Amino acid sequence: MTKDVVFEPVNGPINDLVDDAYRAKYASSQYLRPMIGARARAATVRIVPSPGHS
């Protein structure tokens, strides 16, 4: 199956929820800080159907 999609930037509370989930799962990981840092937040996107397609 193939779908046409677009990527939308995500800002606001959703980033906090993602960060909280990473903190809960990876609390003891040395990689946690980069996973919840500004660069990771800036790379978070929402994938949605392309306009005009379902």
Image (cartoon, rainbow, N blue to C red):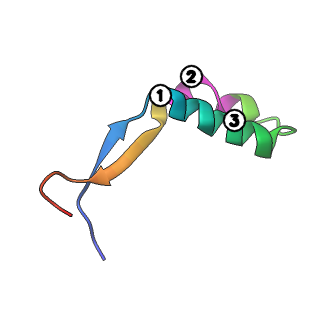
Q: Classify residue 22 as left or right of residue 28.
A: left
Q: Which of disc 3 and disc 1 is earlier in sequence?
A: 3
Q: Position of residue 29 (x, y in %)?
A: 83, 39
Vertical order, 6 against 28 (above or below): below
What residue span does the magenta drawing correspond to? 34-41
The quadrant the N terminus occupies is bottom left
Q: Residues within 10 Å of mark 1 (few under 14, many from 20)?
A: few
Q: Residue 26, which numbered label?
A: none
Vertical order, 14 against 53 (above or below): above
Q: Amino acid at mark 2?
A: Ala
Quarter of the image where one finds residue 5: bottom left
- The CA span between labels 2 and 1 is 6 Å
- The CA span between labels 1 and 3 is 16 Å
The quadrant the C terminus occupies is bottom left
Q: Position of residue 25 (x, y in %)?
A: 78, 46
Which tag is nearer the camera, tag 1 or tag 3? 3
Residue at label 3? 20
Q: Which of disc 3 and disc 2 is earlier in sequence?
A: 3
Question: Does the segment drawn in magenta span residue 40?
Answer: yes
Quarter of the image where one finds residue 32: top right
Q: Amino acid at mark 1?
A: Ala
Q: Residue 38, which numbered label?
A: 2
Q: Are marks 2 and 1 in contact (CB under 8 Å)?
A: yes
Q: Residues within 10 Å of mark 3 (few under 14, many from 20)?
A: some
Q: Amino acid at mark 3?
A: Asp
Q: Nearer the viewer, residue 14 or 44?
A: 14
